[in-house]
């Protein structure tokens, strides 16, 4: 048994807290929101973000960050991506170099183009940061529906420690040394999921969605490999696995926001209606900036940015994607 804290009491943080408690760990959940902590203490359930998932009586909820961080073996960073840097900065005062931080947020910091594990290391120099990612909607993990995910870390022992804490008979955890590849796949799939949702909102069909998933994966892989990620990572759980589930499921806030945009709502209106942080919106500009920096062609990412930030109609963006210059699907000419 380990003492662990989940920092962030959104749907994903609560679902993972339940997994960790089920595995016999002593679990503390922290939130910066006093009303949220009061609700969790009173109802033992997140009534708005994960209704129906009951939490055990001995799970601890606190708004005191020092209490949440000190004397814990594992810290799970489950705050939305825009708040990772500020939260890590607050943690730094209490962090012990023996602690492992597992980042489960998904995104790229727009201002610096850094992955979130690098953001955490900026604020907590020398921190041992792992990542956890894959096709894993909180609504299903919280109900104990079989799920498979990947833990990435710079060293084998850390990856195995995280694997052992989280893994059980309905939550299978693989390990990987490719932290960068995992984080790039996790962040960029949200941008493609927005595009898939837009296509749904426009009334397009399965053919269109399959095309967006496939070509979106090609874009993510091109960029990820150029940045130093491993190709096999993008064909795995945190790549194509997470992309499929995020583009196809109504649990996906990115797809839901995309649907609303495709139906004619503005980005702001869509985010307000979804009522959760839409990570793809925050990652879209960073993805475009990375594509420019590494000189990688990413037409889907380009068109998502046009729709989100330049007032281009969704239908016009689809037209631009369909009418691009003729291309080969593979880069190697195999004809004789």
Image: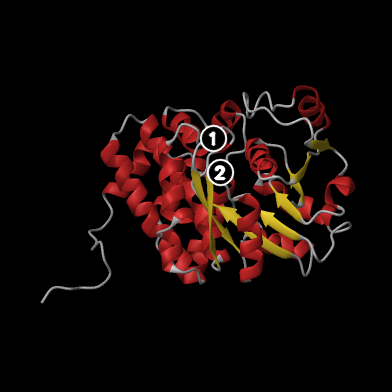
> Which residue is rendered at x = 42% and y = 67% of the image?
231
> Which residue is rendered at x = 36% and y = 36% of the image?
199
Residue 121 appears in the rendering: yes
Residue marked by disc 2: 281
Q: CA distance from mark 2 to mark 1?
A: 8 Å
Crowd class of label 1 (few under 14; some 14 to 19; many from 20; radius 10 Å): some
Residue 289 appears in the rendering: no
Q: Quadrant of the C terminus?
A: bottom left
Q: Secondary structure at mark 2?
A: helix
**Apparent side of residue 28 relative to residue 312 in the rendered image (left or right):** right
Q: Secondary structure at mark 1?
A: helix
Q: Nearer the viewer, residue 228 or 235?
A: 235
Q: Are marks 2 and 1 in contact (CB under 8 Å)?
A: yes
**Apparent side of residue 105 relative to residue 42 in the rendered image (left or right):** left
> Which residue is rendered at x = 20% and y = 73% of the image?
333
Crowd class of label 2 (few under 14; some 14 to 19; many from 20; radius 10 Å): many
Q: Nearer the viewer, residue 318 or 128?
A: 128
Indicate the position of residue 224 as horizontal and vertical percent values.
47, 65
Residue marked by disc 1: 267
Indicate the position of residue 276 as horizontal and vertical percent values.
62, 33
Mark drawn on residue 197: none
Q: Compared with residue 58, is residue 113 higher up or lower down, i.e. above or below?
A: below
**Apparent side of residue 122 relative to residue 64 in the rendered image (left or right):** left
Q: Compared with residue 109, is residue 336 higher up or lower down, i.e. above or below?
A: below
């Amino acid at each position: 048994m380990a003492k662990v804290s989940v920092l962030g009491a959104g749907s994903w943080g609560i679902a993972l807290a339940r997994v960790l408690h089920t595995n016999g760990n002593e679990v503390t959940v922290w939130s910066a929101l006093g009303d949220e902590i009061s609700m969790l203490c009173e109802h033992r359930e997140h009534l708005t973000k994960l209704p129906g998932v009951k939490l055990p009586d001995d799970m601890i909820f606190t708004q005191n960050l020092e209490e949440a961080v000190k004397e814990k073996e594992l810290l799970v960073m489950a705050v939305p991506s825009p708040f990772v840097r500020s939260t890590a900065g607050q943690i730094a005062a209490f962090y012990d170099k023996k602690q492992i931080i597992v980042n489960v947020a998904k995104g790229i910091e727009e201002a610096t183009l850094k992955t979130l594990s690098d953001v955490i290391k900026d604020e907590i120099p020398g921190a041992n940061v792992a990542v956890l990612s894959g096709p894993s909607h909180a609504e299903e993990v919280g109900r104990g529906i079989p799920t498979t995910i990947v833990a990435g870390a710079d060293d084998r022992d850390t990856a195995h420690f995280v694997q052992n804490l989280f893994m059980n008979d309905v939550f299978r955890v693989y390990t990987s040394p490719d932290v960068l590849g995992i984080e790039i796949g996790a962040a960029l799939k949200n941008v493609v999921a927005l595009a898939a949702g837009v296509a749904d909102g426009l009334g397009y069909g399965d053919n269109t969605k399959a095309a967006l998933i496939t070509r979106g994966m090609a874009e993510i892989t091109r960029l990820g490999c150029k940045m130093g990620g491993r190709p096999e990572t993008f064909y795995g759980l945190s790549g194509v696995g997470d992309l499929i589930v995020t583009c196809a499921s109504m649990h996906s806030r990115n797809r839901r926001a995309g649907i609303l945009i495709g139906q004619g709502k503005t980005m702001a209106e869509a985010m307000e209606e979804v009522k959760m942080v839409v990570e793809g919106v925050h990652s879209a500009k960073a993805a475009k900036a990375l594509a420019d920096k590494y000189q990688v062609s990413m037409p889907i990412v380009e068109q998502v940015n046009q729709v989100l930030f330049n007032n281009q109609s969704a239908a016009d963006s689809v037209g631009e994607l369909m009418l691009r210059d003729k291309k080969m699907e593979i880069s190697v000419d195999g004809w004789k």
